[in-house]
Image (tube, rainbow, N blue to C red):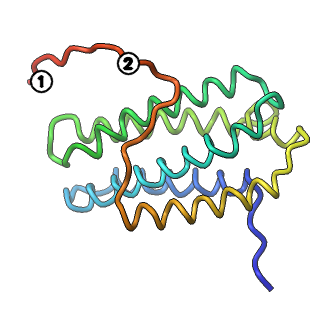
Amino acid sequence: MADKAPDAIALLKADHRAVEELFEKFEATTSEAKQKEIATRICTELVIHTMIEEEIFYPALKGKIESDLLDESYVEHDGAKLLIGQIMASEPGENFYDAKVTVLSEEIKHHVHEEEMPKEGMFAQARASDVDLDALGVEMAARKDELKAEFKANGLPVPTARTLKPVEIELGEPVA
């Protein structure tokens, strides 16, 4: 008998715990090789997580939960993607590398809190809706497996921002 796929919320919460553990491992190591390996795993997990949320979970919740909460989640994802791109383009030991991973961790903690908050969080609102979380979980688990295989074969893609518009920004001299 095959194992039943977790519902959508259980799947997302498991992702949250896995990434939290990776951030703890990053903080605990001083080895640059280990930092790079762990940071790459963090970024990969977060890219997959944001993709399944944006492709499947969030669209299923549109009109079923507070729209402000959903809008903020998309924007929070894009903020994280900016840091993911910076981390993936950097190496441990470079200026601000550790700081970028730390700020990403803080952003993710905030995002997780917003989703998991009892009563008014996104997950609580989703559970109170008529959304079929079991069917979503099956769909999300399948997409997650597909993305893992794709990224293993082809590497991590450039994150796609969905709420940002192009702006000019001047890059000044690095902080000494």
Extreme bottom residue here? Answer: 1
Residue type at mark 1 is: Pro
The N terminus sits in image quarter:
bottom right
Q: Is residue 65 left or right of residue 156?
A: right
Instruction: Identify the residue at horizontal 74%, vertical 22% (top origin).
Output: 67
The one nearer the camera, 120 or 54, is 54
Occupied quadrant, residue 69: top right
Instruction: Identify the residue at horizontal 13%, vertical 22% (top origin).
Output: 175
Instruction: Identify the residue at horizontal 31%, vertical 36% (top origin).
Output: 100
Q: Which residue is mark 2?
A: 166
The C terminus sits in image quarter:
top left
Residue 135 is tagged as none
Q: Which class describes the residues within 10 Å of circle 1: few (<14), some (14-19), or many (20+)?
A: few
Q: Is residue 144 left or right of residue 165?
A: right
Q: Which residue is mark 1?
A: 174
Instruction: Identify the residue at horizontal 51%, vertical 34% (top origin).
Output: 77
The one nearer the camera, 55 or 37, is 55
Q: Position of residue 53 (x, y in %)?
A: 63, 44
Q: Which class describes the residues within 10 Å of circle 2: few (<14), some (14-19), or many (20+)?
A: few
Q: Position of residue 29 (x, y in %)?
A: 28, 57
Q: Position of residue 165 (x, y in %)?
A: 44, 18
* In the image, residue 8 above or below residue 62: below
Residue type at mark 2 is: Pro
Q: Is residue 157 left or right of residue 87?
A: right
* In the image, residue 82 above or below residue 138: above
Callout 1: SS:
loop
- Select label 2 or label 1 by which is in front: 2
